[in-house]
Image (cartoon, rainbow, N blue to C red):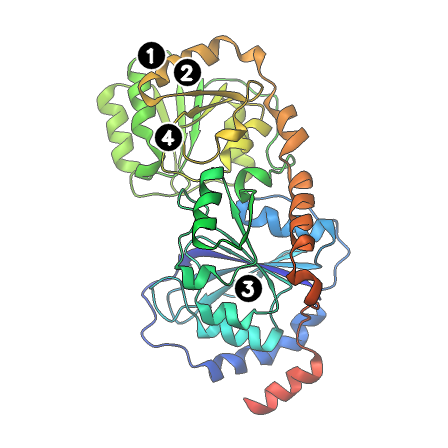
């Protein structure tokens, strides 16, 4: 079956593995259940393209008919990764890491690829994977996106293996081409471009907050810019900060209290997407305060919930989503004026309509499909199918 795999740089589990997993042992584990797993892949359920930035692109590939199955792979620090989690069209797997250095290597992942074959499309986000994994997926169409302000967060020896690199700005594209002049590059950041109108949407509820900021409690999200702006606005301006994760949550709560700001906080840990959508609907505008940030998915998520967005004018990636219809930009020193001005003219904006016309997953998956089909390698590559049942039986004989 044609399959898309997304490998994120998410790591879980503790402590780090004390020994590198033996590939033969992991091959035995994968081959023991390979036949049953292949048989369960068939489903007739409708594909719902929902969730966060990790889920939406692979599910869009299934919905478009490019592949029949989607998987998300992440890295496990310990020696006993959790069991796979499967929905109708999406499976999540965790693989033991060989070590904590990045790009990440995993003999466990290599063993899985040997049993099941390489995916048709391999997407690698963030800190990347080792060359060995890319060599094992030589017949896959390989896509990379850094999900951050730097266009490449992997060594050039690794990035050279990709067929397509997705960027979030003209400057990022230029950085990639300076390193790889012949690389296929496209401005199609996976977060804001693959927006899901069924995950984020307007609902009828009381607007009891003026501002919402959905962002990790991390320094690069620049909550300090928001707090400085709130300090120059009337204390009647109410703000909600929602943290999915991050180490600065306690310090930010303390800062807001010491400044006497009218701010409520939720998380970490994060809340489900349905609750994020409900919280967005309680606010009048959304803000993005970062500078050294990628194109945050929350840009179009706010907009789909009906909120215009005030973004930092110095945001390195993603300002193309701020138009007169969707919001405004303001320098950090003038952020309070931007907030006050937007709150006075909410009727001037129509953010959801703008996203529906341009940036939902239905538009972006068509662009991605054209990019894949236009690549020279697509003409010479055959479809990389999963390992056949006969091959699985031979592998069982080798490793039993």
Gap between marks 1 and 3 measured at Cα: 49 Å
Which residue appears at 49% of the width and 38% of the height? 170
Q: Earlier in the sequence, mark 1 or mark 2?
A: 1
* Badge number at residue 265: 4
Gap between marks 4 and 2 measured at Cα: 19 Å
Residue 367, above or below 307: below
Q: Answer yes or no: do the residues labelled 2 and 3 have beta carbons within 8 Å?
A: no
Horizontal side of residue 121 vs 109, given as left or right: right
Callout 3 secondary element: loop
Q: Position of residue 294 (x, y in %)?
A: 44, 40
Q: Position of residue 291 (x, y in %)?
A: 36, 33
Gap between marks 2 and 3 measured at Cα: 45 Å
Residue matched to label 3 = 84
Residue matched to label 1 = 233
Q: Position of residue 335 (x, y in %)?
A: 36, 18
Q: Earlier in the sequence, mark 4 or mark 2?
A: 4
Q: Answer yes or no: do the residues labelled 1 and 2 have beta carbons within 8 Å?
A: yes
Gap between marks 1 and 2 measured at Cα: 9 Å
Quadrant assignment, res 311? top left
Residue matched to label 2 = 339
Q: Answer yes or no: do the residues labelled 3 and 4 have beta carbons within 8 Å?
A: no
Which residue appears at 34% of the width and 71% of the height? 17
User: Dot 1 surroundings within 10 Å: few (below 14), some, or many (20 or more)?
Assistant: some
Gap between marks 3 and 4 measured at Cα: 33 Å
């Amino acid at each position: 079956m044609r399959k898309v795999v997304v490998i994120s740089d998410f790591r879980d589990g503790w402590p780090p593995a004390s020994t590198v997993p033996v590939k033969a042992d992991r091959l035995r584990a994968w081959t023991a259940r390979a036949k049953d797993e292949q048989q369960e892949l068939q489903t007739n359920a409708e594909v719902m393209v929902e969730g966060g930035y990790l889920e939406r692109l692979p599910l869009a590939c299934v919905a478009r008919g490019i592949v029949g199955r989607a998987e998300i792979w992440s890295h496990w620090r310990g020696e006993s990764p959790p069991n796979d989690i499967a929905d109708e069209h999406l499976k999540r797997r965790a693989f033991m890491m060989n070590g904590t250095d990045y790009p990440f290597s995993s003999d466990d992942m290599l063993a899985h690829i040997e049993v099941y074959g390489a995916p048709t499309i391999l997407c690698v986000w963030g800190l990347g994977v080792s060359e060995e994994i890319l060599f094992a997926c030589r017949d896959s169409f390989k896509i990379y996106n850094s999900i951050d302000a730097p266009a490449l967060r992997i060594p050039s020896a690794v990035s050279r293996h990709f067929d397509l690199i997705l960027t979030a700005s003209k400057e990022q594209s230029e950085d990639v081409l300076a390193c790889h002049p012949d690389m296929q590059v496209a401005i199609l950041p996976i977060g804001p471009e693959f927006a899901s109108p069924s995950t984020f949407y307007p609902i009828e509820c009381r607007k009891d907050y003026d501002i919402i900021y959905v962002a990790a409690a991390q320094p690069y999200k620049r909550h300090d810019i928001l707090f400085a702006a709130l300090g120059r606005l009337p204390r009647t301006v109410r703000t909600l900060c929602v943290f999915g994760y991050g180490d600065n949550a306690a310090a930010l709560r303390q800062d807001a209290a010491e400044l006497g700001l009218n701010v409520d906080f939720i998380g970490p840990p994060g809340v489900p997407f349905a609750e994020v959508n409900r919280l967005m609907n309680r606010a009048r505008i959304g803000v993005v305060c970062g500078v050294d940030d990628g194109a945050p998915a929350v840009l179009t998520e706010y907009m789909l919930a009906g909120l215009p967005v005030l973004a930092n004018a110095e945001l390195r990636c993603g300002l193309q989503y701020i138009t007169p219809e969707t919001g405004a930009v303001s320098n950090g020193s003038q952020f309070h004026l931007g907030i006050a001005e937007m709150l006075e003219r909410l009727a001037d904006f129509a953010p959801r309509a703008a996203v529906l016309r341009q940036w939902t997953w239905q538009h972006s998956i068509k662009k991605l499909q054209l990019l894949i089909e236009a690549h020279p390698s697509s003409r010479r590559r055959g479809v990389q199918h999963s390992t056949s049942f006969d091959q699985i039986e031979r592998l069982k004989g080798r490793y039993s």
